[in-house]
Amino acid sequence: MPVATQGTIKGLSVDEVEAAGGRMMLSNAYHLYLRPGDMGVRALGGLHAFTRWPGPMLTDSGGFQVFSLAKLRAVTEDGVEFRSHLDGSLHQYTPESVMRVERNLGADVIMQLDELIAGGAEHDASRAAMERSLRWLERCRVEFDRITRDGREPAPPYTVSSDAPPLATADPEFDLPAPEQALFPIVQGGTHADLRRASIAGVLGTGDWHGIAVGGLSVGEAKADMYRTLEWCEPLLPRTKPRYLMGVGFPDDLIEGVRRGIDLFDCVVPTRIGRHGTAFTPDGTAQVRQSSYRMDRRPLVDGCACPACTRYDRAYLRHLFASGEMLGLRLLALHNVTFLLAIMSDARAALHAGTFTSWSAEWLGRYRAKGARQHDEELAVADS
Ligand SMILES: [Zn+2]
């Protein structure tokens, strides 16, 4: 899932994301709750109508942003009190309020509120957060079901000019019932095998979920710990449900995740590193500002179907970045998103063909062999 934190994949139109092979998009409930507000999005027809994204959407609860971005005031059993990173205003996130926000936003898949702790946290702290996340899951489920049954609260009236397109809230019959959505639970437990098992048992014991997320990884722990944790979870997660590894999305992590039974990923990395001139290639990342690209007429990545690679060469991309032209940022974001989606498409094809083991070994071998050396060269370029 390409990440549209603020309801847009930075720099790209929904048509471009679709053309790049995007099927499902992720947005963030924390950011949209603060601006423009979940009621505002709902009044404008919900997240699909608001963003014009025709495909499936998922909203993260925003718990991660509350714990990482906002100024935390207090974390209690009831919920989290925090100050907005935008204007310092005081807010409270509870499992119930997060469900109301996400049901107002209207994505197809919505995430529970969970408690986050630092990667590699001690056993006691990991257990406390994992157990609290299970209790919060139950509260999310109860509120989710209540909204399904009773409908959403009436939205405040919005004043619009008479020639504006109709708002969803103008029609209570359409507006008050919540859209059909799936609530995903999040498996927690840090990098501790017993806690991950207990978390999965707790999650599976409380509902027949449409899908299950694995959270609390890629938050500073070693990659080997992340892979091992996925190996503990894999045999316990139902094979018939989509499994979503949250916040993970470097090329090698995607393939290692698929190897360990993961179906869904999200990560802001492709657009974030793209803005800094870093491109994914089959041989690791490459910095387009590098001097060797100055007169290089070759495409950024041979065989890549994105516009940056089919229409332009390395010399032009380097020039765009050297000149601070915004087309450079857009093209690189487009390339990186296309590149990751192509990996997943190739992985699916290899799985269907029964060649995933050899395909993934070959892919990772090439990516890692040159990748490490290239990374060092880039650092040298960046320093010079
Ligand atoms: Zn490309």
Image (cartoon, grey):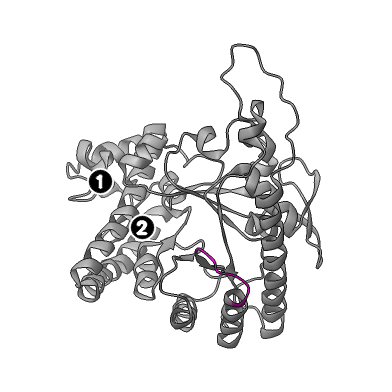
Quickly name the residue at label 2: 378
Magenta stretch: helix, strand or loop mostly: loop
Q: Is residue 72 highlighted in magenta?
A: no
Q: Residue at x 68, y 47 (%)?
A: 101
Amino acid bearing label 1: Tyr
Q: Are marks 2 and 1 in contact (CB under 8 Å)?
A: no
- Binning the other alpha carbons within 10 Å of mark 2 as few (below 14), some (14 to 19) or many (20 upward) gives some
Location of residue 33 in the rendering, given as x and y in whole percent from the top left corner:
68, 43
Per the image, label 1 sits on a secondary structure element best described as helix
Span colored in magenta: 205-210
Q: Is residue 199 visible?
A: yes
Residue 215's spot in the image, x, y percent? 56, 68
Label 2: which secondary element: helix
- The label shown at residue 293 is 1
Tally of numbered tags? 2
Circle number at residue 23? none
